[in-house]
Image: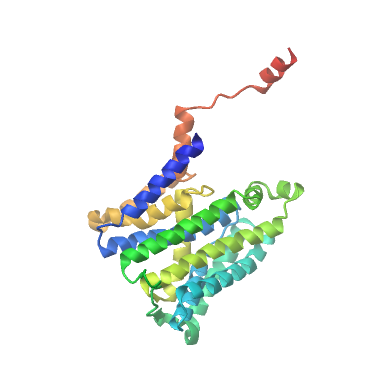
Amino acid sequence: MKDSWRFVAILLLLVAAILLPIGQKNYIIYVLTSWLIFTIAAMGLNLTLGYAGQISLAQASFMAIGAYVTALLTLAGWHWLAALPPALIISFVVGLILGYPALRVKGHFLAFVTLAFNTLVFLVLRNEDWLTGGTYGLSGMPRPDFGLFSTDKHLPFYYFTLAITVIAALALWGIVRSPWGRAFKALRENPVRAESLGVDTRRVTLLAFAIGSVYGGLAGALITPLVQFIEPGSFGLAHSLRILLMVVVGGAGYFFGPFIGAAVVILLPEVLRFTEGYYLIIYSALVIVMLVFVPSGLIGIWGRLKAKVWPKQQVRTDMAEGAGLQ
């Protein structure tokens, strides 16, 4: 019964995502597309942080890797589909390398390591102008054309991004429901106990960083044709913190948390623009209040309400044992 309701809810959300941009102006469609792209990036960080418990402040740097690799290859004449695999492979390899410090340091020390990596990527992109264009960035990247289906206009590109998001979500669903997903959760809860039960914590830690990085690279590969202009400032530390906020606001460790968190961070400021100069103040106040009163994220509110309205009946173990002895 629970799975049936979940399937219906997912189907309704998908239908809403399909119908939402119809009849909207280009700017609204652009914002909705940005929401989908940042949802993909947040899904990757949610796997690394929410499921595996490994803190990372470098997700924007993997978006940069995916964006710049895709931009350079498409500007050289490659089709977007041909440029995507190299972008994802490089993101995977770099994420695997970044995962090695997580084998030795934990907590805020690991956060500082990933922060330093994000800064390093930013400096390379800014200073190596022979490759990246430096502070001037790269521009003119084409949107993918599939013959009968072109994504040159905003609405087709939105549906193209939606299809990629659905595929990425299905892949992540399979990962978290697989033995690897259970290993990620075991690593988050208690690494020592997980290792005593036979979990290869070294491999699981590296894999958590690598897969999360691939999702960041995929988001970057989609940002490139969306804005058709990229520069180092678009992938600084502030954007990594923004993606982290999406995961925390939505609910770290919940599968649908990134969708809700990205909607709050990307869409809520647009909804509050009618307040003119006060919208950022209102937005910040709402986020602070939510983090104080609902630290488990917005998706955790349903669990708390359900526990209060329909509390589970707990069976006393001593009574159960007594009944068994009679």
Count the labels in the image: 0
Residue 205 visible, this angle:
yes
> Which residue sits at x=44%, y=50%?
249
Q: Quadrant of residue 262?
A: bottom left
Horizontal relation, residue 206 to residue 26: left or right: right
Q: Is residue 105 visible?
A: no
Of residues 57 and 71, the one drawn nearer to the viewer in this rendering? 71
What colouring method underlies this structural image?
A: rainbow
| Residue 59 rendering spot, x and y as whole percentages | 51, 64
Quarter of the image with the C terminus in it: top right
Q: Position of residue 278 (x, y in %)?
A: 27, 55
Q: Nearer the viewer, residue 179 or 116?
A: 179
Residue 106: percent from left, percent from top: 64, 57
Residue 69, percent across and down? 50, 76
Residue found at the far front of this picture: 148
Q: Relative to 82, is 45 above or below?
A: above
Q: Residue at x 31, y 69 (%)?
A: 153
Relative side of 199 to 161, left or right: right
Residue at 69 percent of width and 61 percent of height: 103
Residue occupying the far bottom of the picture: 130
Which residue is at a point 25% across and 59% down the rendered structure image? 24
As drawn, the residue found furthest toward the top would be 326
